[in-house]
Amino acid sequence: MARLNLTGVDEGLSVVVSSKLTGADDPEIILDSILKLFPDFTCGLPEKPIFPSSQNDIIASQDVRLDVFLQALHKQSILDTSLDFMSANLDETGTVFHISRQAAMAGKVAFPLQGIEPLGGVITIEIDGQNLGDWLEAATWHNGRENIPRRIGDEFTMDDSGEAVTWH
């Protein structure tokens, strides 16, 4: 069965991508890291900070396509991990999750553990929409799920420390 190529656009979802700029964060470098995974991200940028800086800004864009981000998940073969992280904060209104800006700079996706701020900061992705759980499962589907089906919150979901519960 061929994989669906989901984008998040015209699929009943609202997607907001944002990142917080603090201290000496260079807005152009942060924008470049976001554009690697979300090429249609658009926003105005604050001025480049001058040392010492008390910068505390947020850059954000709405209705961002998720196709390049989803392609990266498939290319990196991290679909089950992605399902677990993307659905960890899922409720009836939507989900929010973070990815590493440093990994994004290389066109890669890395999910920081809850409560841990990775070096270089994070990109925040907020997705709202009806039947979002089903959409996340479809967006992260791979052929291995024919043999070992996965669902959000199933017995294979990783624990809070990021460990696979089935490998212990």
Image (cartoon, helix red, strand yellow):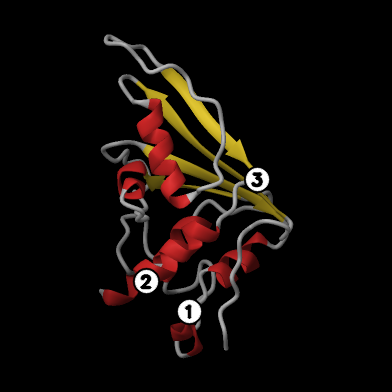
Tag 1: residue type? His
Image quadrant assignment for residue 4: bottom right
Q: Nearer the viewer, residue 122 or 51?
A: 51
Asked whether the viewer can see residue 113, the reply is: no
Distance between mark 1 and mark 3 Cα atoms: 26 Å
Distance between mark 2 and mark 3 Cα atoms: 26 Å
Picture coordinates of residue 10 (x, y %)?
A: 73, 58
Q: Nearer the viewer, mark 1 or mark 3?
A: 3
Residue found 44% across the figure and 84% down from its top: 144
User: Label for residue 142?
Assistant: 1
Badges 2 and 3: C-beta atoms under 8 Å apart?
A: no
Residue 69 in the image: above or below residue 140: above
Picture coordinates of residue 7 (x, y %)?
A: 61, 61
Picture coordinates of residue 45 (x, y %)?
A: 49, 24
User: Element type at marker 2?
Assistant: loop
User: Element type at marker 3?
Assistant: loop
Residue found 44% across the figure and 57% down from its top: 85
Tag 2: residue type? Ser
- Report the residue marked by disc 2: 77
User: Element type at marker 1?
Assistant: loop
Picture coordinates of residue 165 (x, y %)?
A: 34, 70
Tag 3: residue type? Asp
Residue 134 in the image: above or below residue 37: below
User: Label for residue 63?
Assistant: 3
Q: Of label 2 and label 1, which has the lower sequence position?
A: 2
Q: Is residue 93 left or right of residue 154?
A: right
Label 3 CA crowd tier, 10 Å (few <14, some 14–19, many 20+): some
- Image quarter of the C terminus: bottom left
Q: Nearer the viewer, mark 2 or mark 3?
A: 3
Q: Of label 1 and label 3, which has the lower sequence position?
A: 3
Residue 78 in the image: above or below residue 94: below
